[in-house]
Image: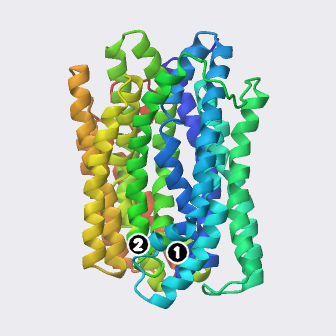
Amino acid sequence: MNAPEGPKSVVRSATGMGAAAAVSRTFGGVRVLVIAAVLGTTYLGNAFQSANTVSNILFELLAAGALSAVLVPTFVGHLDGDDQAGAEHLAGELLGVTLAVLGVVSVVGVIIAPWLADVLTVAVSDPEVADAQQDLTTFLLWFFIPQVVLYGLGAIATAVLHARRSFIVPAVAPIGNTIVLVGFLVAFRIMAGADPGLSLSTTEKVLLGLGGTLGVVAFVAVPAIAVWRSGFRLVPRLSRTHEGLGALLRLSGWASVQHGSAAVLFGAAIVAGSAVEGGVVAYQVGWFFFLAPYGIIAQPIHTTILPELTAEHRAGDMAAFGRSMRWALDSMVVWLVPLSALCVALAVPAMTVLAFGESKGSGSIELLAAALASLGVGLLPYGAFFLLARAFYVLGESRVPAVVGILAALVGVAIMGIAAATSSSTTTVVALGLAYSVSFLVGSIGLTVILHRRLDAWVLPSLLGRTLAVAAFAGTVAWMLQQWWDPSGRLGSLLALAVLVPLAGGIYLGGVRLLGVSVTKRLPNASTPGAAP
């Protein structure tokens, strides 16, 4: 039987998962930068990244909500009740449904790949470039779309591990993807040379396609093998006899809509970004570094608090449920708000240090920095939205975050559409990032208001005002000093970061301390869910 962990164990688990995620994100950063270095902020980079994104979007549209946070509360109920056989039965039947549905989607996707490629290049104005990019994108889609089946297996395996309070293995799984894909990209660079354009040989195209797909195989294999080694029998079942399957599918259907709305928003950014040469690559590089603090800080908090929220809800202790939510929000606030300030203030020197190969030109660095700064503004709204959505999953109300997510996505897509039609180059990339941030801010506010009605109490981060004021001041100081310094080149920018990041961090830590906020109380063994600031 898996007993609830208790508050201090939640903090330790979140910290352990965060450390593992930090290692994984470091490897992932290498992957993203190698893609930018080998393929460049070019139409070739756009083609690869656009095609590689399709399987992710399809999975989010069709199954991600069903196979992520929604599954964990259900599995927790079985495993905490010493019913592993029931959990295995339910997971097996769900895996059978998932493989069947996503298998059909893969076949259809491969057939309609040329039409998908047309959509992905609709914003490219040069007809010759558009035709060449469509041909390459179609070829890559034949490799990438079937990845959606693998993602289904990986998501169910990850949900099982999270329900068993095993958080480290899923956090490090992306390292396998990085190792495989980087190896293939190095081979591609050796064969194709620098800046090969869109006219690639069949062998060169196969290297790109295989690299992306075998990387996903390695990524999914890690949690799947971990589940099987733990003694949990995860095998697909063709039966539909488990009494909880129907209810789970109904609940997860709305959750899939919510995740799908986020995927549509991301897809809109990819389509709009393709109007700018290298815009898709810049957006996705910025997206990765935006997700890094989310994955290291916010996601471990979401993941490790979810089983505890489930236990509190099952026990009818909604006061504890509210305290746990406030603790999670405040824990995100004290870390994500200052990181947002740094993303905005120091985006240019950061990208100057990180960019290399075909992405190190001044124009490319401008695009990369614009993406990082504009997305960085939305770190806290993004983290808060998905935490609040998980709270509704625990309450059995997955329709609420789905409807709110759709409305928020419509706001973001509208802003992106206006930006694509009225701006160009760096301005377009900035607008796309800000649209994403505004969308999740709208969604977070909406979910907060509705959760207040459900709990008859506000679930708000008590530390937001103080941390926001101090972080804004620290970020402004760092930006002004960076403008005065005006570092040039990788070495100069690295030196500037080495001075300005600790300086801004010191200002922030000292400022919040003066205002009565202790950041160390958000570290393991020093604070518990529901504790004071």
State whether residue 467 is above or below residue 313: below
Instruction: Specify which label sits upstream in the sequence, 1 or 2.
Output: 1
Q: Which residue is mark 1?
A: 46
Image coordinates of residue 379 in percent, x first then y, are 38, 51
The quadrant where residue 100 appears: top right
Q: How is the image coloured?
A: rainbow
Q: Position of residue 277 (x, y in %)?
A: 46, 82
315 relative position to 164: left or right: left
Q: Residues within 10 Å of mark 1 (few under 14, many from 20)?
A: many
Q: Quadrant of the C terminus?
A: top left
Residue 196 lies, with reference to residue 37, above or below; the image says: below
What is the x, y in percent for residue 261?
Answer: 38, 49
Mark drawn on residue 524: none
Asked whether 133 or 292 is in front, the reply is 133
Which quarter shows the N terminus? Answer: top right
* Tags 1 and 2 touching, CB below 8 Å: yes
Task: State the image coordinates of residue 12 (x, y, percent, origin top left).
Answer: 56, 29
Residue at 46%, 61% in the rendered image: 287
Q: Nearer the viewer, residue 325 or 527?
A: 325
The CA distance from mark 1 to mark 2 is 9 Å
Q: Amino acid at mark 2?
A: Gly
Crowding at dot 2, Cα within 10 Å, few <14 / some 14-19 / many 20+, comes out as: many
The residue depicted at 28 percent of the width and 68 percent of the height is: 417
Asked whether, in this view, residue 493 is left or right of residue 507, the answer is: right
Helix, strand or loop status at disc 1 = helix
* Callout count: 2
Front position in the image: 474 or 244: 244
Q: Label 1 sits on what residue type?
A: Asn
Q: Does residue 190 appear in the picture of this structure?
A: yes
Q: Mark 2 = which residue?
A: 273
Q: Is residue 119 above or below residue 287?
A: below
Residue displayed at 52% across by 81% down: 43
